[in-house]
Amino acid sequence: MEIRAVLRDPKTFGRQQHIQWLLLASCNILNALHLVASVFISASVDFRCQIPGLKNDTFAVQGWEHNSSISQYIPLKSDGKYDSCHLRVTNTSQLETCNSYVYTTSIFKDTTVTEFNLVCDKTALSTLAGVVYMAGLFVGSIAFGAVSDKLGRKWTIYIGLCLQAVFALSIRFAPNLEAFISLRFLLGAVCIGGLVTQFTLMIEISPPNRRTISAIVQTLGWAVGVILLSGIGFALRGWRDLQLCLACISIPFILTYWWLLTESPTWLLSQGRFEEAVQIVKRIKELNNLEDVDTEQLVDTENEETQAKESWRKVLVSRTIIINILINSFGWFVGSMGYYGLALNVGNLVGDIYVNNLIGGIVEVFAYFLLLICLKAGRKPVYILLMSIGGVALIVSGFLIVYLPEEGLSWVIVTISMIGKFAVSAGFELIYFWSAEVYPTSMRNSMLGINSAAARVGGMVSPVIADIPKYSENMPFAEGAAPLIFGAFMLMSALSAFFLPETNNIPIPECVKDANELTYNYKGFKPYISKTKLVGEVEMTSTKSNLL
């Protein structure tokens, strides 16, 4: 009995894979808690200069004498609000910059911005912290991809969990901004590396007709993490308290996952480790009650040794795979840029930051469930539709921001913008697992690492685009520039997806040769193949697939 056929057979899917799904989705909850925590940890709050000589000065007015002192020392800006960065020199109209500040504590007890005084002339350091953090995600995407393909999925995930706890706890005790930035860089690297590896394992343990559901389940874990973070952040208003709590949440994962998580049998076969793959199949047989699977007669007719020796040399001479990597990387870049630009900037939205973050998580849940329903039509048409709708919605919202009167009609802009956010969330999730289905098992995680690195570049670009109105006040269309740019990139991503293969319900390629054949035979919108054509050395007799 061919072992790969057993692993691909939907009849062998059951309790064992469901347990692995739950474990990997739970890991993604942890990833979201750490990766999105910066929304609260590094949030900006209202502040002003501290009144000279008043040690117990607070942002909140303590009485009429305190209010009089504020009026004496703190000048007003043209909009009637207090100047945040200047003091009035006593008995003169001259202003001087200050180096000590008081912050409102109505929302947060403290954040890194308030503790390290990342305001006024030090505002750029807060932006730098975010850029370095994204650079950590960039490095982790590439490094962990190679580590996973070398050491295996299980080892990489477990190492990532351990390092995640260590770096998260270290951040809690960071003595200065330099240490905080450095540790956040390392935490971002291990979190995103673990996320990509977990996703790869989820895809590889699922038969073709379950890959869509598996990817949605794993991403729902992320959305649940975003929702939980709102509650944890609301309960713990200090950034160090929140960071300590997140570090402690990692401990149960470290204590249990080595014994609960199984290695990818597909990866083991690609490395020529047949006996270890057989042991996993025996465990699947036991947990899923598969009486008709004879584990003593399993064979692997494919050449594992050849696959194990595959290198980037074969990839670099394959124009088809290179094009797929480039198109997917662009899709990841656009998805990350749009997601971070629209979803993680909740602090800049009107309303309570915790409620906004909660709503964002709920919107993602609905987006992923809708994606699950729509994917019966295939990967390509759904992705093109989502990115087209999102792109048009954001471009329209950009024009409305500039030309629509603000009075009473702001809900129109918010609604259309949320349509764009809904579409980019679903589209980013779709390109995530669509990419995994295009790449060969022997080098899948390395290629996904390249895609994820492109996504991190998009994440670094998004705040720069979002801040265009701040440094381009004289530009005629500055206020609507961000959604226009995001929307234009989404439309370009939709156009580029026409050149990717349709992979719905098709066995994932095992080697570079299979990946080339996959792209050649599935260029249209519907998966089809001739009755004699082999993909991954498995004969496909159906011409169309109507399964999810």
Image: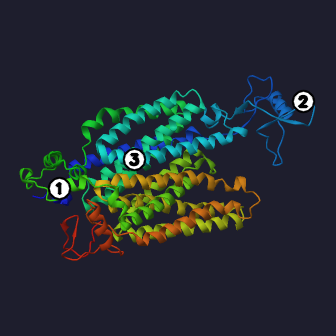
Q: What x and y, as percent, mark residue 112?
A: 60, 35
Position of residue 357 measured from the top left corner of the image (x, y, whole percent): 53, 48
Helix, strand or loop at label 2? It is loop
Q: Quadrant of the N terminus?
A: bottom left
Task: Determine crowd level at label 2: few under 14, some 14-19, many 20+ residues with C-alpha closer than 10 A.
Answer: few
Under tag 3, what secondary structure? helix
Residues marked 2 and 3 touching at CB (< 8 Å)? no
Location of mark 3 (residue):
195
Mark 2 / mark 1, whichever is N-terminal:
1
Which amino acid is tagged 2?
Answer: Thr
For discs 2 and 3, the disc positioned in front in the rendered view: 3
Q: Is residue 393 visible?
A: yes
Residue 201 located left or right of residue 383 = left
Give the residue at x 53% y 59%.
421
Query: Which residue is disc 2 drawn over?
Result: 90
Q: Is residue 224 visible?
A: no
In this picture, is 79 found above or below 50?
A: below
Image coordinates for residue 303, horizontal then vertical, percent: 18, 57
User: Of label 2 and label 3, which has the lower sequence position?
Assistant: 2
Q: Could you tell me which quadrant the C terminus lies in?
A: bottom left
Residue closer to the observer: 193 or 217? 193
Q: CA distance from mark 3 to mark 1?
A: 26 Å
* Residue identifier under label 1: 12
Residue 332 image offset from top left, x and y in percent: 46, 58
Amino acid type of the residue that numbered disc 3 sits on in the rendered structure: Leu
Label 3 crowd (10 A; few <14 / some 14-19 / many >=20) = many
Q: Amino acid at mark 1?
A: Thr
Query: Earlier along the polypeptide chain: callout 3 or callout 1?
Result: 1
Residue at point 56%, 36% (across, down): 181
